[in-house]
């Protein structure tokens, strides 16, 4: 199982994501971000690309779509918190959102 991010490693891994609009959930076991697109088509296109990515990595987001917004929470359920699987997927999601 992937190890939980802790201490300085955790801080360093999160720094670029927090600068890109991700926030820690209040219980600090997850990170979250609200993506807002121009329309539903762009939001769903983003979700489609991320879904393929997530399945390939066997690491899946918790997310909710309402019209042109996608609210995402990332956490490694098996580990009970944040791992590099989450920070890497978060980075890939930011890249996917920039493509639309
Ligand atoms: N996705 N976010 C997340 N966290 C997990 O622990 C996880 C997952 N997708 C698949 C998965 N675990 C499987 O590896 C196991 O549940 C078998």
Image: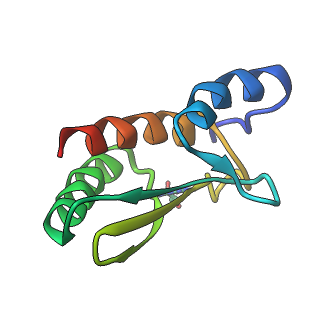
Q: Position of residue 11 (x, y in %)?
A: 76, 27
Closer to us: 29 or 1: 29
| Residue at 61% over, 52% down | 76
Residue situated in front as seen by the camera: 81 or 24:
24
Tell how many labels: 0
Quadrant position of the N terminus in the picture: top right
Using residue 47 as the reference point, say whether residue 59 is left or right of it. right
**x then y, percent, for residue 38:** 22, 61
Q: Residue at x 72, y 51 (%)?
A: 81
Question: Residue placed farthest to the front in the image?
Answer: 38
**Residue drawn at (39%, 65%) of the image:** 70
Locate residue 91: give its quadrant: top left
The quarter of the displayed image where residue 89 is located = top left
Whole-percent x, y for residue 3 in the image = 70, 35
In the image, taking residue 84 as reference, residue 94 lies left or right, namely left
Q: Residue at x 58, y 26 (%)?
A: 16
With respect to residue 86, does 7 lie above or below?
above
Q: Residue furthest right?
A: 7
Q: Is residue 64 above or below residue 14?
A: below
**Colour mapping used in the image:** rainbow
Looking at this view, is 63 or 38 the one in front?
Answer: 38
Q: Position of residue 61 (x, y in %)?
A: 46, 59
């Amino acid at each position: 199982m992937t190890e939980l991010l802790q201490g300085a490693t955790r801080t360093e891994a999160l720094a670029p994501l927090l600068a890109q609009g991700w926030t820690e959930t209040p219980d600090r076991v997850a990170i979250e971000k609200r993506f807002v697109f121009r329309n539903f088509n762009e939001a769903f296109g983003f979700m489609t690309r991320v879904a393929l990515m997530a399945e390939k990595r066997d690491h899946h987001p918790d997310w909710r779509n309402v019209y042109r917004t996608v609210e995402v929470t990332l956490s490694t359920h098996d580990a009970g918190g944040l791992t590099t699987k989450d920070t890497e997927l978060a980075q890939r999601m930011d890249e996917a959102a920039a493509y639309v």
